[in-house]
Structures are given as structure tokens and as C-alpha cells.
Amino acid sequence: MSTERRTTFFRVLSLLAVIAISVWIFSIRDKASELAAFGYPGIFVISILANATVLLPAPGVAVVFAMGGIFNPLIVGVVAGVGSGIGELSGYLAGYSGQAVIERGNIYNKIHPYIEKYGSATIFILAAIPNPFFDLGGIAAGVLKMPVGKFLIWCILGKIIKMLIFAYAGAYSIEWLFQFLR
């Protein structure tokens, strides 16, 4: 098999995997909170699954918020951040496959030049702030063939910051609520 055919094969396979994962995760989204009963490993798995969907909503941040009030918020934030970063590989793979339909989208066209010019910093910032557009950043990173390790490191670091904020918000809001009810 020629290099070009092998590359095309892996790109199509990547795209099909991303579509299958997204559809499957979207179909089980209501059962995701049950995994929280497994503690930190459950939070890790929920975070991977919630972020493995491409452009479909999943309840990951809400679970991190709630679990931050039950478990140690520092550990919840780190575990959820690492899981979230790993889950975001699906968007990267969609872009890497070269089959990203979203490339012609208005928001994508605004994000793409920042990924191209600033790379890691853009991935880090998009991952660290709550926004619905991170998938487009991951797709752009894949399209631009950013090294996967570089993408993953900056994505995980940004996601850890974001998840720490949600976990601590959950921890302190629960404490505040209990103090208010006394």
C-alpha cells in the first residue's frame, strides 16, 4: 500500500472513529453521572467521554462542579483536566483526518489563523476558558498537523485550570449553601 493510500486510509478511519464516538457518547449522556459513584476514576472517565464528542454537548463540567463539592476539589480538577484533554483528541483527529466539514465555518475561520500563528498558546487559552468553540481549535490544530504531543500537553494544562475553577466553585458553593441554610 502506498504512503498516500495509507495516509488516506488512516484519515478516513480517524474520521469514522470520531463520528462513532460522538454518536455513542451523545446517546449515553444521561447515564454519565452514574460513573461519578466510582470516585476519581469515574470523574476521569466522565471527563474523557464528555470531551470526546465533537460539537455535541455533554455534561462534563456540571459533573466536575458537583464532584468538587463532594471530593477534594484539587484532585477533581486535575483528574478531570487530564481526562478532558485526552477526550479532546477526537476533535484533533477529525481535523487531522482532513475531512473536517467545519473548515468553512465562520468561527473556524476566525480561530484557524490564531492556531496557525500562536499554536500552543491558543490551544492553552481556548482550553482554559469555558467556551463552546474548543472543538474548532482542536480541529484546526489537527488540520495544521500540530504535533499531537504538543497539542495534548497544552490542552491538558488549559483544561486542568478550567476544571480546577469549576471544582473549587462547586466546593465553595456547597459550603456557602450549607452555611446559608444554618
Image (cartoon, helix red, strand yellow):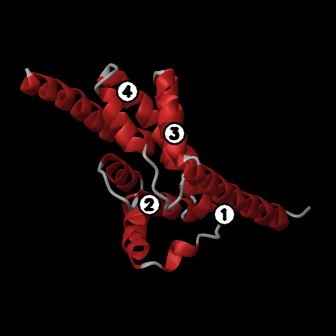
Residue designated by label 4: 76
Q: Residues within 10 Å of mark 3 (few under 14, many from 20)?
A: many
* Crowd around label 2: few <14 · some 14–19 · many ≥20 (10 Å): many
Kindly indicate whether the residue at mark 1 contacts the one at mark 2 (C-beta within 8 angstroms).
no
| Closer-to-camera residue (152/40) | 40
Q: Identify residue for label 2.
A: 137
Is 35 above or below relative to 51? Answer: above
On screen, residue 18 above or below 159:
below
Residue 112 is tagged as none
Q: Earlier in the sequence, mark 1 or mark 4?
A: 4
> What is the distance, in whole Å, between disc 2 and disc 4 at their CAs?
25 Å
Helix, strand or loop at disc 1? loop
Tell me the CA gap for discs 1 and 4. 32 Å
Q: Secondary structure at mark 3?
A: helix
Tag 4 or tag 2, which sits nearer the N-term? 4
First in sequence: mark 2 or mark 1? 1
User: What quarter of the picture does the C terminus occupy?
Assistant: top left
Distance from label 3 to label 4 (Cα)?
Answer: 16 Å
The residue under label 1 is which amino acid type? Answer: Ser
Q: Nearer the viewer, mark 1 or mark 3?
A: 3
Dots 2 and 4: beta carbons under 8 Å?
no
Along the line of sight, which residue is nearer the eye, 98 or 17?
17
Residue under label 3, please give it.
32
Q: Classify residue 180 as left or right of residue 72.
A: left
The label nearer to you, 3 versus 4, is 3
Identify which residue is drawn at 46% across, 41% down.
84
Q: Which residue is mark 1?
A: 97
Residue 160 visible within the image:
no
Could you tell me residue 136's position as x and y percent? 46, 64
Q: Earlier in the sequence, mark 1 or mark 3?
A: 3
1, 62: nearer the viewer:
62
